[in-house]
Image (cartoon, rainbow, N blue to C red):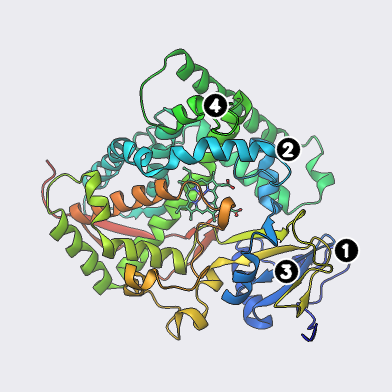
Amino acid sequence: SSVKEVPIPGPRGVPILGNIYDIEPEVPANSFELLAENYGHIFRLTTFGKPRVFISSHELVDEVCDEERFTKIVSAGLHEIRNGVHDGLFTANYPGEENWAVAHRVLVPAFGPLMIRGMFDEMYDIATQLVMKWARQGPTAPIGVTDDFTRLTLDSIALCAMGTRFNSFYHDEMHSFVEAMVGLLAGSGTRARRPGLINSLPTSENNKYWTDIEYLRNLAQELVDNRKENPVEKKDLLNALILGRDPQTGQGLSDDSIVNNMITFLIAGHETTSGMLSFLFYYLLKNPSAYKKAQEEVDRVIGKRKIVVEDMSKLPYITAVMRETLRLNPTAPMIAVHPHPDKNKEDPVTLGGGKYVLHPDETIALMLGKMQRDPKVYGPDADSFKPERMLDEHFDKLPKNAWKPFGNGMRGCIGRPFAWQEVLLIVAMLLQNFNFELDNPSYDLRIKQTLTIKPKDFQMKATLRHDLD
Ligand code: HEM
């Protein structure tokens, strides 16, 4: 072709370990940002002999979102999580693992608008518990924002997907299921940063990892058995897992697949959503005029009455605040693709219209947060929090693939409508009932990273606006 090949830049590594010293283990996202600033919208890192390309411009991300050329790859931490949930939706290698397609067809209807509306009352129930807790704590108590939002999102996904109450607002220590799940997630993160040999040794750390997994799976199976023995007529995710049938083959999910996906919903559904809520309140508190508009919208549309599911479509400004929050800080900050094993016939595979040549089957990491601040799309104020730019009339006109916090195409987030309703409801309810302020007015955003990102050490205070009924 006429396009001139350009070498992909990147820092020189050390022998064997490659670039691991270029990645800060606490918050890898910070290192990737820095590298993107130094090397540009495409750079390469090699760790343990495995090269990976990182991209952060809209143009390149748009190119790899073409599902005819590229498809999701389950790598690094996500690959380790497979130890716990096998070929569940989030961790399945598809094409290749047919269980993904079956579970996808069975579960897509479970996340349809009608079903999500059906879960409103249970979300409302848990949301009320958070309001009660903050009301009782009074206006001077600093709130550990991220911890309490995690209690909320965990309890609400557990109620909807497992038919069980964790009652996290009534205990300081975590429910044993959550403890084991955190063990799986933290262990998977650590394992992804270590050579495989160390992961296979019978150390107490490795033993705990596998014990946690066994505990999670047994408890999940018990909850499935319990619902099967005591059926309830309810539109929730647990019933969808048990009763759903594949429209194509008529088959239901195996017990193994039900357990994989039940745990998957908890893993994929709680931290992403609680991180989003935490960032959202951070941005509102740092942007008083946006805060005021959001609260005025709640007062105008809902006032003091009980929030109902019909209100969810009547809050355009808060919707824009949610979109803008996920633009600046997508809580699942990175997704990964590789050349489609069946469809991509290009050899060698290239990016940038032939400019950048990839290694065979090289992983491409999409830096969503940086891409969503691309000044070519969002202008010179791309780093500022401006919900107005996300009102429907602008949002609908964004270039394709310029806002991707829920991932791409058929491997995009199945839980998006669930998360959206949950966040809208709790934001509306909190603004309706409280006035918030930062605990420390000079707090500036710092990031804590696990599989997802969230604000670190972010605390606020909540004053009731009126008596609770
Ligand atoms: C997939 C983000 C909430 C379940 C994804 C992906 C992203 C994402 C980026 C693609 C991952 C990849 O390409 O590797 C988010 C964000 C959320 C959220 C930002 C909240 C603000 C939820 C909730 C659930 C959920 C509440 C469950 C109730 C899933 C599942 C997948 C997924 C099962 C895998 C889909 C598949 O490959 O078939 N999510 N998610 N997510 N998410 Fe979410």
**Above or below for 19 versus 337:** below
Q: Which mark is residue 53?
A: 3
Give the SS element for disc 2. helix
Question: Marks 1 and 2, how far apart in space?
Answer: 24 Å
Residue 441 visible in the shown view = no
Q: Position of residue 444 (x, y in %)?
A: 42, 71
Q: What amino acid is found at the position of numbered circle 2 in the picture? A: Asn
Q: Nearer the viewer, residue 181 or 366?
A: 366
Q: Residues within 10 Å of mark 2 (few under 14, many from 20)?
A: some
Q: Is mark 3 within 8 Å of ligand 1?
A: no
Give the SS element for disc 1. loop
Going from the N terminus, do you reach mark 1 or mark 4 first? 1
> Which residue, given by chain and number where applicable, does mark 4 sit on?
220
Going from the N terminus, do you reach mark 1 or mark 3 first? 1
Going from the N terminus, do you reach mark 3 or mark 4 first? 3
Going from the N terminus, do you reach mark 1 or mark 2 first? 1
Q: What amino acid is found at the position of numbered circle 3 in the picture? A: Val
Q: Which mark is residue 206?
A: 2
